[in-house]
Image (cartoon, coloured by chain):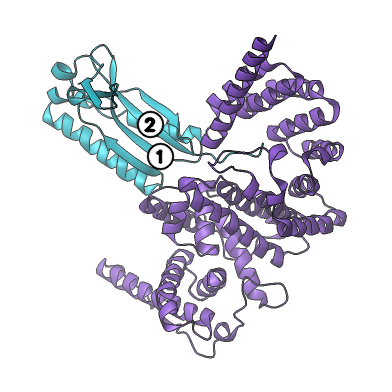
Amino acid sequence: MRDLAPQVLGAVVRRFGDFSAAEDAVQEALLAAALQWPEQGVPDNPRGWLIQVAARRMIDHIRSELSRRRRDGVVLMHEPPELQVVPAPDDPVHTGRASTFGSAGSAHESEQDDTLILLFMCCHPALTRPSAIALTLRAVGGLTTAEIANAFLVPEATMAQRISRAKERIRSSGVPFRLPTDRERAERLGAVLHVLYLIFNEGYVSSVGPALQRSDLANEAIRLTRGVHNLLATDGEVAGLLALMLLTDARRQARTGPEGELIPLAEQDRALWDRRAIAEGVALISDALPRGAVGPYQLQAAIAALHDEAARAADTDWPQILALYGLLKRMSDNPMVGLNHAIAAAMVSGPAAGLELLTSLDADRRMAGHHRLHAVRAHLLEMAGDHQAAVTHYQAAAGATTSIPERNYLTTKAARLVSETASQRRDL
Amino acid sequence: MKYMLMMHAPRAGWTNAGIGTWPPEDFKAHIRFMMDFDKELKKTGELVGAEGLAGPEAARVVRANRSGAPEVTDGPFAEAKEFLAGYWIVDVENTERAYEIAARASAAPGKGGVPLNMPIEVRQVMSAPPVDM
């Protein structure tokens, strides 16, 4: 049913124009369907059913708006044209195929456009990222406000406000309901992919306690990105992002232990990795890379593929990973890339080479005191056998991280090194 | 990103120069400010939770004794310069926004409508997703 959400919303916005109210009406229609369908059975044309219910809500909304305005003494020259629009049974939107998210070629062109237009709107650069994430999950993902609030551990009322503020922002900045122009397109698609990436990251957490529900966000991000890939099959970066998500998510079962503790890549039980997801991710990236216009998501996916294809940690093709991070570093100014590049250098040429690369990051203001810089330095110092310095940096990293599983991991690393050093001294 | 904003009130003069000694209209203005502030944060979709705490006179400190039973003592706050008066938890886009909200809270009106400029401790809540190691 949620697959239908963007198509239904697109149809309602096209008919009534008011995105904000249409979005509310579709949400109500989805809630009504969630209540009625399990009892009364799924209607023959679920999409048409949802459009009809949402359209009825829209008409109610417009009527009450009109009478409110009349009460408020607003003089109307004539009835707005919306009210003359009544859903007709032979309307093409009712007879349209109820295809899911819209695999290219099978669905109406306008339906595909609608899903993309909605994504471009919800991820508009005028919105803050938290607002864009919330609105995307509701308007395109078809999640309820309660589900989104749950995933982000905030009260439902807060999330509802965030969504309505986002819609207000769209209204006031006058974003038209159409695809971006060719000139805007690259930047706008970049914003869409970034939002999808953030949703994935938010969900890609350990499966402990309240975090458990958040893993659904990773699935949701994959579902939405798959939808975009179906619509823009030739776009390398879209394919790259989908591949990156699949190749990363494939390790989900292996990356945490029974008590939710983080297990680093090198120590994961690779038998637990999801082979099907890996095969799909590898196929996607192998297909995208030779087509040219290689971007950062494709490079990250290629790196993830190299990790996933190694049967044992020792089999990892570090020279190639190092080369890919080198390319990525030239493409992006993100200091996190520099960190990973240093790790790869250490794996290829030894810890001294990695530590040498880290010194250039010390001058980067964005990295000053950052826990990841401490954590990577600690790791490389441990590799180099300087356990005392490694402990200092593990502890500094543990103090600065804002992730509980990560803090526990770093604290354990420090504690282990301390006790190993102590027992070595006793042995002497 | 979630942050906890902790409002620290000065301990000195709490009973003889504290909020209870303000003219009623100043006290009212302060309360109204706090209520409006909560409403505003709800409207921006950033408020996760907020509470005001009862005065430090009633604060107790609990420690487990040897058998694990609670051992209750008066707060060790006599020598403390400040006490926790209340907190907000907000979910915001970045640190700068958390500071902005904290500054607004800090400037809550006091006696004669003069901003209190209370210290607001800003602490990030541990809620970030971990990265791959």
User: Is residue A422 shown to the viewer in this render?
Assistant: yes
Q: In this view, does B108 lie to the left or right of A17?
A: left
Residue placed most toward the observer, A111 or A375: A375
SS type, badge 2: strand
User: In which chain is the residue bearing label 1?
Assistant: B
Q: The purple chain is which one?
A: A
- Residue A148 circle label: none
Residue under label 1, please give it.
B90
SS type, badge 1: strand
Q: Say if B90 sits above or below A158 in the image.
A: above
In terms of image quadrants, where is residue B29? Answer: top left
Q: Which chain is cyan?
A: B
Q: In this view, does B85 lie to the left or right of A281?
A: left
Residue B6 placed where, x, y %?
A: 35, 29
Residue under label 2, please give it.
B5
Q: How crowded is mark 1: few (under 14 residues within 10 Å), some or many (20 or more)?
A: many
